[in-house]
Image: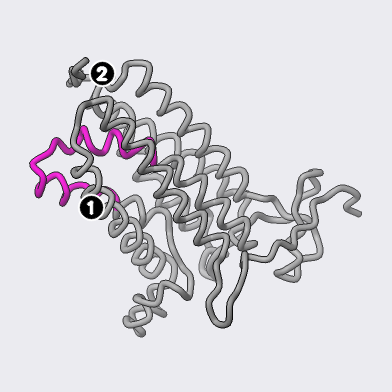
Amino acid sequence: MHLLYVPWDVNPEIFRIGSFAVRWYGLLFASSFLFGYIIMKKIFDNEKLRIEVLDRLTIFMAVGVIVGARLGHCLFYEPDYYLKRPLEILMIWHGGLASHGAALGILAAIWLFTRKEKKDYTWVIDRIAIVVALSGFFIRMGNLMNSEIYGVETTVPWGFVFLRNGETVPKHPTQIYEGLSYLLIFILLYTIYWKKRGGHVQGLLISLAMILIFISRFFIEFLKEDQVGFEAYMKLNMGQWLSIPFVLLGFAALYWSIKRNKRVVVKK
């Protein structure tokens, strides 16, 4: 018998007017871009860079995140379904976004941005890593408000009973576990940046972000319910298999960054 638990029955819609509804997930998703922009503006001001460049970077980032996250879900988790119905890939309002796909979309979008703007790729991706970690926190809180992507049954006193999904026993609130992990990673990266005011070893922040974010994701996945049917036959689920290359890439990038030891001299 479960004596202690958190009954969770939050309406995912904030309000509705006719067929138009404002959802918590959408608000939190938009908040990730808003606060990301504010933080990046502070960084740009610190390094005496034009805000017009940040505006263009934000557009590239938004497209990269949405396209990457959608394609990631469709191709990593439900390829059979979406390859037979390719037009449904465009229907993002039906749900289905994958953080690993978003990560790939960000890397690709920034590569295109730096080629167009003639900027240093490592410099851009290193600073974007800060706001990506914070965005992860907002997205997981959105998942919590949607009562989705939660964990297996648990007896811990903070287990959530997701009533809207018909659950009757407490489950691990893995959205909170992940969200808090990403928030702590954001605080770490933000602190490192401002301690040196941008004069840290270039590549350090993105390396740490990939290592810490995806190691956290790898271990929290052990507590999650399977997202798709085929994961029931896997020793490691899809999220874990997709996390491993990012962790390895992060360690390789960290080694390369420390060996290169390149730093930006920020103008006073």
Q: Is residue 122 magenta?
A: yes
Q: Is residue 184 left or right of residue 112?
A: right
At label 2, counting other C-alpha atoms closer than 10 Å, the crowd grade (few under 14, some 14-19, many 20 or more) is: some
Residue 18, position in %: x, y? Answer: 58, 82
User: Residue 263, relative to residue 93: is it above or below?
Assistant: above
Which residues are drawn in magenta?
Answer: 106-131
Q: Is residue 264 left or right of residue 19?
A: left
The local secondary structure at tag 1 comes to: helix
Q: At 38% from the left edge and 21% from the top edge, which residue is drawn?
A: 192
Q: Quadrant of the N terminus?
A: bottom right
Residue 131 at x, y = what percent? Answer: 39, 40
Where is mark 1, residue-wise?
A: 109
What residue does disc 2 label?
Answer: 199
Q: How many marks?
A: 2
- From the viewer's side, name the closer residue of 80 and 257: 257
Q: How is the image coloured?
A: one colour
N-terminal of the pair, mark 2 or mark 1, is 1
How far separated are the C-alphas under marks 2 and 1?
Answer: 24 Å
Q: Position of residue 264 (x, y in %)?
A: 19, 21
- Residue 255 tag number: none
Q: Residue at x 44, y 67 (%)?
A: 77
125, above or below 170, in the image:
above
Few, some or many residues within 10 Å of mark 1 (<14, 14–19, 20+): many
In the rendered structure, which amino acid carries the disc numbered 1?
Answer: Ala
Residue 17 x/y as whole percent? 58, 77
Q: Quadrant of residue 71?
A: bottom left
Q: Indicate yes or no whether the magenta region holds residue 200.
A: no
The image quarter containing residue 97 is bottom left
Is residue 192 found left or right of 120 in the rendered image? right
